């Protein structure tokens, strides 16, 4: 079994749910306390043992590359002013991992974006971490998926239970056998079903670990609604071709920073976890909310 060391972060979306903030700034660069949201995702991957990351970008996404690049002027200025702590934080960004960039020149869906990473991934197993989703936990969501992959030798969908009324927002898993208390086999995978047609309340939430075989099925997948190539359709093709897929109910609090309330919640809750901001934020909330 090959060790999982590669990951893909699709980050080419327009961020329409948080306009006008994303008119000229990538949604992945919206700040949560003191870091852009994308940095939290990259740090999760690196902490989980990922060494090589390809970020799928689009137009007006140059700031993503700049953020993880070496910045001579800034580093020299911080060095001259002896701001060593800030200097280390900045240097860390350009050394964190091997990061590569591929542009998705047409908005043809998540499946199309992942297909752009084929020359980079080859036949290797790899993680997909959606740029909209941050997961907070002491043990990263990616680590949990890698352990599941190593245990069962199968592609893994990262899922969590959602309220029944929310199944229309997600890809929903139809489970087959129960493998352990957190993992089930996958019989079917339905994209945004109606409440009546949903096979479960197990929703795929922004983390996948897929075998490199997925590219073959992506290439064979025709564009569907809106002219987009859906990753869900390719996973189904892979499953029906006899390739095992499991769903793992990962632990952790997920934040959808692609919408306004998710972004606000992330800022508040990460602010409460941050030593620099925690006390002042608690004081502010008590004063404003009369707690």
Image (cartoon, helix red, strand yellow):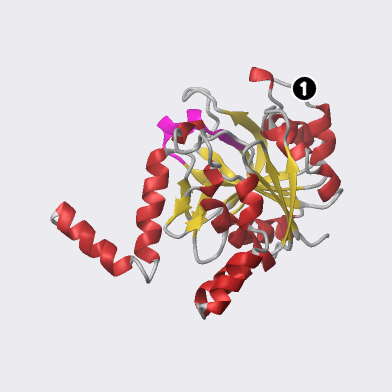
Q: Is residue 189 magenta?
A: no
Judge whether residue 48 can be spotted in this image: no
221 shown above or below 95: above
- Residue 84 at what x, y percent from top left? 53, 79
Q: Quadrant of residue 52?
A: bottom right
Judge whether residue 197 can be spotted in this image: yes
161 shown above or below 51: above
Q: Is 167 left or right of 288, judged from the image as shown?
A: right
187 shown above or below 150: above
Q: Which residue is mark 1?
A: 222
Q: Residue at x 47, y 44 (%)?
A: 257
Q: Residue at x 18, y 59 (%)?
A: 286
Q: Which residues are magenta?
A: 162-174
- Residue 227 at what x, y percent from top left? 69, 19
Q: Residue at x 78, y 39 (%)?
A: 116
Q: Is residue 163 magenta?
A: yes
Residue neighbourhood size for the residue with mark 1, other residues' Cα within 10 Å, grouped as few (<14), some (14–19), many (≥20): few
């Amino acid at each position: 079994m090959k060790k999982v060391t590669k990951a893909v972060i699709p980050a080419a979306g327009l961020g329409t749910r948080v306009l006008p903030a994303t008119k000229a700034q990538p949604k992945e660069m919206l700040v949560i306390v003191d870091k852009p949201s994308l940095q939290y995702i990259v740090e999760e991957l690196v902490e989980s043992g990922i060494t090589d990351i390809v970020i799928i970008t689009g137009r007006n996404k140059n700031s993503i590359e700049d953020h993880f690049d070496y910045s001579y002027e800034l580093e020299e200025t911080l060095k001259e002013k002896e701001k060593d702590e800030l200097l280390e934080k900045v240097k860390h960004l350009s050394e964190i991992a091997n990061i590569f960039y591929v542009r998705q020149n047409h908005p043809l869906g998540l499946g199309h974006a992942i297909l752009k990473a084929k020359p980079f991934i080859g036949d290797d197993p790899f993680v997909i971490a959606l740029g909209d989703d941050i997961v907070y936990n002491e043990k990263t969501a990616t680590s949990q998926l890698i352990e599941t992959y190593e245990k069962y030798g199968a592609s893994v969908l990262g899922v969590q239970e959602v309220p029944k009324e929310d199944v229309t927002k997600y890809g929903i898993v139809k489970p087959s056998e129960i493998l352990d208390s957190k993992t089930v086999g996958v019989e079917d995978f339905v994209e945004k079903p109606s409440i009546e047609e949903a096979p479960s309340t197990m929703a795929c939430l922004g983390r996948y670990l897929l075998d490199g075989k997925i590219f073959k099925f992506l290439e064979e997948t025709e564009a569907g609604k809106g002219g987009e190539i859906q990753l869900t359709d390719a996973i189904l093709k892979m499953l029906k071709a006899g390739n095992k897929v499991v769903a793992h109910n990962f632990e952790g609090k997920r934040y959808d920073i692609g919408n306004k309330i998710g972004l606000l919640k992330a800022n508040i809750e990460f602010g409460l976890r941050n030593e620099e901001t925690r006390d002042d934020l608690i004081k502010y909330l008590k004063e404003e909310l009369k707690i």
